[in-house]
Amino acid sequence: MTNDGTGAGAGQAPPSALLDLVGLLDLERIDRDIFRGQSRPAVVPRVFGGQVAAQALVAAFRTVPDDRLAHSLHAYFLRPGDPAAPIVYTVDRIRDGRSFTTRRVVAVQHGQPIFHLSASFQAGEDGLEHQEPMPAAPDPETLPDSTELLPRHAHLFSDPGVAGRLAEARAAVDLRYVTEPPYATAGQPREPRSQVWFRTAGKLDGDLDRPVLHLCLAAYISDMSLLEPVLLAHGRGGWTVGDVVGASLDHAMWFHRPFRVDEWLLYDQSSPTSQAGRGLGHGRIFTADGRLAITVMQEGVVRVPRG
């Protein structure tokens, strides 16, 4: 098995939406350290940031020894991506050490860099262990999924077609909010904190069941809701309601412990600050049995449209 991040399913086939998402991460190799990826239809006229981050991580993984998994990534979103054009990923092999490997990836479209990622990989080893406890959260099976939640609030969106496009874009992921999302409570400031349970909409078994794919899909999903606590603090519904203009600026992830992205993961999110047209999001991703698997940080543009 190689660190290529993709593969064909075995046994009962996952839903087509999940297979499409996995296929999105199956980059074409056009040279030793150069890869090409495609995009899926976008809800907004730019490439989803989580897609670029996940594809860049796949590109990095394809140049790393099989015994090493990503333990951290740090990325900057430089320009909006064009969903109608392919993205070329160039990998620089910065360092190959005895325990750690470092890679830098630049994503290019139309001759310009749109995204930059640095990732570090580590061979497995034992060490000191401690973690914060998992916060309380209800059973995800008791919460509505997107197919229930989005139609219920479609009338709140600035564009009536957004709810359908958003549901289609999220069809590969079972995303369940513990409390109402920002678009459902616009005008009502709340504590800048949100919890979301998520898992892929189907099992990753057979050739799909590889740690690399779980890591890359987690990177994809981690960008879906992390800045929402910023909106909650100010009673803003977000771009779907039209009272905020936003975009990701940077994104960082630390992978702590093994996890499966096709099993329930709790995304505990908060925002410690927002200012100067920017908001900061902090996330902790726990397995259902309470292990802290991933920590995420992101800063993004969060602007109120000028009337």
Image (tube, rainbow, N blue to C red):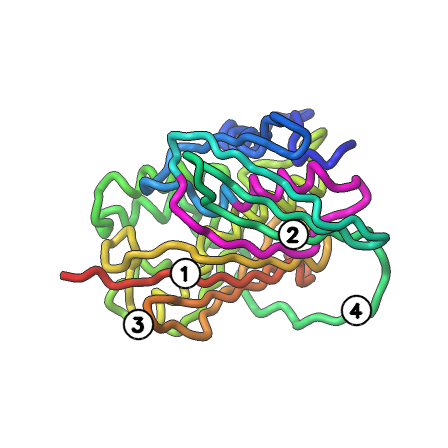
Residue marked by disc 2? 119
Q: Earlier in the sequence, mark 3 or mark 1?
A: 3
Amino acid at dot 1: Gly
Q: Secondary structure at mark 3?
A: loop
Give the Cα distance between marks 4 and 2: 23 Å
Kindly report which numbered mark, 3 or 1, lies closer to the viewer in this rendering: 1
Magenta-span inclusion, residue 76: yes
Q: In this view of the protein, which residue sits in the foreground, 110 or 67?
A: 110
Give the Cα distance between marks 1 and 4: 32 Å
Residue marked by disc 4? 129
Amino acid at dot 2: Ala
Q: In this view of the protein, which residue sits in the foreground, 143 or 4?
A: 4
Contact flag, marks 3 and 1 (Cβ < 8 Å): no
Residue marked by disc 1? 300
Q: Is residue 61 above or below residue 142?
A: above
Amino acid at dot 4: Glu
* Residue located at (50% from left, 42% from top): 52
Q: Secondary structure at mark 1?
A: strand
Q: Which residues are magenta?
A: 53-81
Q: Position of residue 305 (x, y in %)?
A: 21, 60
Q: Position of residue 284 (x, y in %)?
A: 58, 63
Q: Earlier in the sequence, mark 4 or mark 2?
A: 2
Residue marked by disc 3? 189
Which quadrant of the rendered structure holds the C terminus?
Answer: bottom left
* Residue located at (28% from left, 51% from top): 240
Q: In this view of the protein, which residue sits in the foreground, 130 or 245?
A: 245
Q: Would you call the spot at circle 4 few (<14 residues within 10 Å), some (14-19), or many (20 or more)?
A: few
Q: Would you call the spot at circle 3 few (<14 residues within 10 Å), some (14-19), or many (20 or more)?
A: some
Amino acid at dot 3: Pro
Contact flag, marks 3 and 4 (Cβ < 8 Å): no
